[in-house]
Image: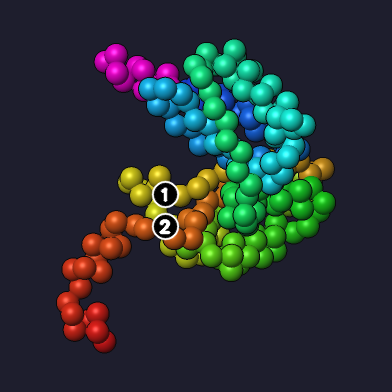
Amino acid sequence: MAIETKFIEDSIVKLKISRYLEKELVRAGFSRVEIQKTPVLTRITVYVLNPGRVIGRSGKTVNEITDAIRANFKVENPQINVMEIENRMLEPRLVAKSITDRLERGINARRIIQSTLKEIIQNGALGAEIVAAGKLAAKGARKKKIRKSLGYLPKAGNLTELVREAHATAYPKYGAIGITVRLVPPGTVFPDRVMRALELPKSIMNS
């Protein structure tokens, strides 16, 4: 039971750190964070559009963030690595934020979702899904949900851990709209698909 409690506590701390970094690094184009705990240190890898804003002059900003994480979240020996995002269309948080910005400018939700899905796939994603829920029409209209997807996207089991996911909320003048973006990055290998291919008869594989 003690091991399970420790696992839950670690997960909560990771979530709090992620939310803290999302708030602090919004101007740097924060996308996601990976946290790996070792016996010696806690390695925190931050993915952003503008690494310079995270590092700061002579490393001042990143040192301040490191000190804050150590003090506020009781993390021993945190080490922050800053990685620049190579393709923003493969980062769900940035995609979701882009959608909310356009919704707040009054652009049609269906048109945004369709074009964004196509762009995600064109940039190499194996699959993607966008869900919009809330006040999708003019003032007085009922809440609705739009769910669109392209490609391969697992919905159950351990394979869902391979799917990147992020949420954002738009606040146009007629009411809030929640946006969820899920995508499978390029190069992702799904064990179930590999096994199916291996089980296929040679006659089918060669046809």
The residue depicted at 49 percent of the width and 16 percent of the height is 76
Q: Which mark sits nearer the N-terminus, 2 or 1?
A: 1
Regarding residue 15, the answer to whether it shows in the image is no
Cβ–Cβ under 8 Å for marks 2 and 1: yes
Mark 2: few/some/many CA within 10 Å (<14, 14-19, 20+):
few
Q: Quick one: quadrant of the N terminus?
A: top left
Alpha carbon distance from label 2 to label 1: 7 Å
Given this view, does label 2 or label 1 mark the residue nearer the observer? 2
Determine the residue positioned at 82% across, 43% down.
173
Q: Residue 188 carries which label?
A: 2
Q: Mark 1 points at which residue?
A: 162
Identify which amino acid the numbered label 2 is placed on: Thr
**Where residue 18 appears, x then y in whole percent?**
57, 30
Q: Residue 111: where, in percent of width, then height?
A: 70, 63
Q: In this view, does 140 lie to the left or right of 7?
A: right
Describe the element under mark 1 as helix, strand or loop: helix
**Camera sees residue 122:** yes
What quarter of the picture does the C terminus occupy? bottom left
Query: Considering the numbered disc 2 on the image, is that residue within a helix, a strand or a loop?
Result: loop
Q: In this view, does 43 lie above or below 155?
A: above
Question: Mark 1: which amino acid?
Answer: Leu
Farthest residue in the bottom direction? Answer: 207
The part of the image, by quadrant, that contains residue 175 is: top right
Residue 182 belongs to the span the image colors magenta: no
Q: What stretch is highlighted in magenta?
A: 1-10
Q: How crowded is mark 1: few (under 14 residues within 10 Å), some or many (20 or more)?
A: some
